[in-house]
Image: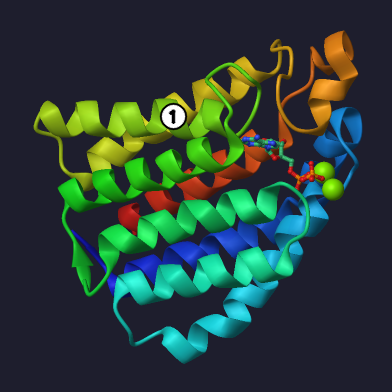
Amino acid sequence: MVNRKQVLQWLQAFATQIEQNKDYLTELDAAIGDADHGINMVRGFKKVISQLTDVADRDIGSILKTVSMTLISSVGGASGPLYGTFFLRASTVAMGKHELTAQHLGELLQAGLDGVLQRGKAQLRDKTMVDVLSPAVVAFRQALEEGKDTTAAMQQAVAAAEEGLQNTTPMLAKKGRAFYLGERSVGHQDPGATSSYLMLKCLLETLEG
Ligand code: ADP
Ligand code: MG
Ligand code: MG
């Protein structure tokens, strides 16, 4: 089970991670983009945290919807609408709920990923956040099928996400700004995949308590 308080802790932890990794994310984006991914994410999540107190006692869906709206309205660049869509779709699964079962969490992550896929039209191996989110969602569902609990399933998801993140380095970018670099995008880890990995790792750490 994941309760409302844990969802808030997760968002807070992710905001903190983003802040601590601001320069790192921006350096990754300097290599294959326009050197603003850390800046974009920090701007968005600072705003998210400032909005959360207003919705902290509402259901998980409402909380995640607020995250979505805040990101869409405050983050320019590709990552704002993409993370915004992730949280918007995730919110629909959690609407009216104050607790999520492992099954719900799996559906929530799947819905978020589906939103990113529909919005960004990236496929696996295009060198984007999809290369982290997609293997994580698959691993989470597989772990549940094996009878694992929420935390154990999330451990497997994060392990798959980490592998997915490392796999982005040798990839040739097919989407986003990095696409325009062609072969020069090879040999660099994708910034958005990196922030998505941090997001999932923060969720795991929250579940582990
Ligand atoms: P921008 O590229 O507009 O400056 P950011 O730097 O904040 O935006 O985000 C870049 C990240 O967004 C990339 O590293 C990649 O992971 C992700 N991204 C870009 N385009 C897409 C897409 N079409 N689908 C999924 N993710 C994408
Ligand atoms: Mg950028
Ligand atoms: Mg930009």
Nearest the viewer among 157 and 178 is 178
Q: Residue at x 80, y 22 (%)?
A: 179
**Residue 13 visible in rendering:** yes
Q: Residue placed at 60% from the left, 38% from the top?
A: 120
Residues packed near mark 1 inside 10 Å, few (<14), some (14 to 19) or many (20 plus): many
Q: State the quadrant of the C terminus.
A: bottom left
Ligand 1 location (quadrant): top right
* Numbered disc 1: secondary structure: helix
Q: Residue 39: x and y, percent?
A: 82, 57
Report if residue 159 is visible in the image: no
Q: Is residue 34 above or below residue 108?
A: above
Q: Looking at the image, which residue is at 86% across and 28% down?
A: 32
Kind of residue indicated by mark 1: Ser
Write down the quadrant of residue 3 in the picture: bottom left
Q: Position of residue 203 (x, y in %)?
A: 41, 52
Measuring from the top left, give residue 27's x and y in whole percent.
Answer: 87, 39
Q: For the view shown, which residue lies furthest in the left direction?
A: 147
Q: Residue at the bottom extreme?
A: 54
Near-viewer residue (117 or 102): 117
State the residue position of label 1: 134
Camera-side residue: 183 or 73?
Answer: 73
Q: Quadrant of the N terminus?
A: bottom left
